[in-house]
């Protein structure tokens, strides 16, 4: 009887190319450098991590590399930032970074810089996904030193049948002709987000006898720009149609700066060219502008975002003009407070003495799905007085008076999650939904518990579709997962 063959020893998981490749995506640059020195197999996998993203502010050593080395590894480069000098462009061209996806350029007013940038973009124009080109100039700089930005040499497609992949374009502080801007839109069919803040547009020196000469880009749905940029306000050819004419499917306007423009004219242009524009973000320290936009310019907005400093009783009243259609209300907090590991201080606000006014937003907006007021502190007494009508609320970012420590916030969140899990089990067991709130309250937050944590949890449990909550520390989420068994569907709630 022959002996059974001895099975080979199990392989080390880190010897499997698939595992090594996955691990290489999550290591730091310094760790990747160390891993390339283990063996050639590891070097082949981890070298892409080293070259994946180039920041010229941090990678000065690239200047010392010879052309052969650059050409050997340049195909790994995917993202480049802080391109501020001609030498930076030459490094990228010599490295043949033809698969570049993300690029940030500080435009210089020299013919050499302009020509090299054109060469780089022609080399990468079918792989680029996003590009930022900005030009910082002195206030009194001569116009001759700040040339017009010509688009055609940069974004033209030279290969037959090729399609540009750009979906996100940011052009800050440039000077462009209207014809060049129209050419940019035509050559970039996949763009959906266009940011043209502080960019000046010179109208064509011809009579506008037909609107057909303006290219319509049906894919752009988000525009970041000021009022004067969009409306050509203050330019010699004010008779030219506004930039809105280029974006028939525009849904969101992120407004960054402003000069006085008649609200009737803005309303006319939006109504004529952008009937789908129903989301307005006003990131300008100008309450009069915000009030004007909300009360005189737009009707039936779906989403509104303003700076937190602008929130006032008058602003709430302006927001409520759109109560029947409003689905999202934001205030833009400073320094991404919602991602902070510390509980931010609540700043004093004129609304502190009139807490019921803010309650009118969730009370009078039945379609509201997102309410983000991270710097405003609500009082549970006010919340419990009036029922919120936004039964389909999904995201809630607020502070609650008295919920001022991580321990209290964690307990309120845990009670909410346990109540959501109890409802999930009830649905799985086929019980009727009418008593779901009663089951939640009885199981995790009995009515005799009058602690601030229990009161907050009981309020959150009223919203069956609530999936994301921030109460001052860490964003908390519950995610529904669907599992099919035969013809029946059960919902399982995974707590994060």
Image: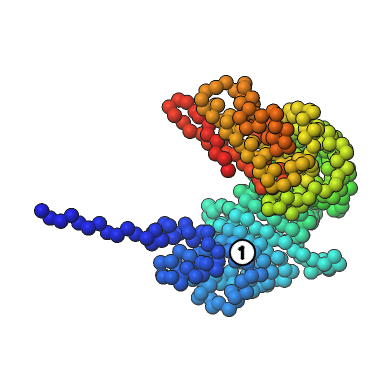
Q: Is residue 482 left or right of residue 258?
A: left
Choose between 51 and 39: the one closer to the eye.
39
At mark 1, the secondary structure is: strand
Choose between 203 and 80: the one closer to the eye.
80
Choose between 137 and 64: the one closer to the eye.
64
Residue at image point 53% right, 76% down: 67
Residue 227 visible in this rendered orientation of the protein: no
Residue on which disc 1 sits: 80
State whether residue 25 is above or below residue 413. below
* Residue farthest to the left, as pictured: 1
Residue 331 position in % (x across, y down): 77, 44
Residue 211 position in % (x across, y down): 75, 43
Residue 167 position in % (x across, y down): 62, 51
Residue at image point 66% right, 41% down: 411
**Label 1 neighbourhood size at 10 Å, few (<14), some (14-19), many (20+)?**
many
Instruction: Identify the image's colour scheme: rainbow, by chain, secondary structure or one colour.
Output: rainbow
Residue 483 position in % (x across, y down): 48, 33
* Image mark count: 1
Residue at image point 46% right, 31% down: 484
State whether residue 12 is above or below residue 216. below
């Amino acid at each position: 009887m022959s002996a059974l063959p001895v099975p080979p020893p199990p392989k080390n998981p880190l010897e499997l190319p698939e595992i090594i490749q996955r691990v290489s995506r999550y290591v730091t640059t310094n760790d990747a450098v160390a891993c390339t020195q283990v063996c050639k197999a590891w070097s082949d996998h981890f070298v892409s991590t080293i070259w994946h993203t180039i920041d010229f502010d941090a990678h000065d050593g690239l200047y010392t590399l010879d052309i052969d080395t650059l050409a050997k590894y340049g195909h790994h480069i995917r993202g480049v930032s802080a391109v501020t000098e001609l030498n930076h462009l030459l490094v990228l061209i010599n490295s043949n970074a033809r698969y570049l996806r993300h690029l940030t350029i500080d435009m210089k007013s020299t013919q050499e810089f302009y020509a090299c940038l054109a060469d780089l973009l022609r080399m990468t124009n079918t792989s680029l996904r996003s590009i930022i080109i900005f030009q910082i100039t002195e206030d009194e700089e001569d116009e001759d030193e700040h040339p017009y930005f010509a688009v055609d040499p940069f974004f033209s497609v030279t290969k037959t049948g090729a399609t540009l992949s750009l979906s996100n374009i940011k052009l800050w502080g440039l000077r462009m002709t209207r014809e060049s801007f129209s050419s940019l839109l035509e050559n970039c069919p996949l763009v959906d987000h266009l940011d043209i803040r502080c960019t000046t547009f010179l109208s064509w020196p011809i009579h506008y006898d037909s609107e057909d000469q303006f290219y319509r880009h049906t894919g752009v749905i988000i525009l970041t720009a000021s009022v004067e940029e969009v409306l050509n306000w203050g330019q010699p050819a004010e008779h030219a149609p506004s930039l809105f004419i280029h974006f028939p499917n525009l849904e969101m306007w992120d407004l960054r700066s402003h000069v006085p423009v008649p609200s009737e004219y803005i309303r006319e242009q939006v109504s004529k060219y952008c009937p789908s524009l129903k989301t307005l973000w006003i990131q300008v320290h100008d309450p009069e502008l915000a009030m004007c936009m909300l009360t005189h310019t737009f009707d039936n907005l779906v989403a509104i975002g303003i700076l937190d400093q602008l929130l006032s009783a008058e602003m709430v009243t302006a927001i409520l003009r759109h109560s029947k259609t409003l689905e999202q209300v934001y205030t833009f907090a400073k320094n991404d407070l919602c991602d902070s590991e510390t509980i931010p201080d609540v700043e004093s606000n004129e609304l502190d003495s009139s807490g019921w006014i803010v309650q009118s937003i969730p009370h009078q907006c039945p379609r509201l799905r997102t309410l983000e007021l991270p710097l405003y502190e609500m009082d549970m007494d006010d919340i419990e007085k009036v029922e919120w009508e936004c039964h389909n609320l999904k995201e809630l970012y607020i502070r609650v008076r008295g919920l001022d420590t991580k321990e209290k916030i964690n307990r309120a969140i845990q009670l909410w999650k346990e109540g959501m899990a109890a409802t999930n089990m009830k649905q799985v067991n086929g019980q009727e939904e009418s008593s779901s709130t009663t089951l939640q309250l009885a199981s995790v937050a009995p009515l005799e518990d009058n602690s601030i944590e229990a009161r907050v949890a009981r309020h959150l449990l009223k919203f069956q579709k609530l999936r994301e909550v921030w109460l001052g520390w860490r964003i908390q989420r519950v995610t529904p997962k669907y599992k099919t068994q035969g013809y029946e569907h059960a919902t399982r709630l995974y707590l994060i």
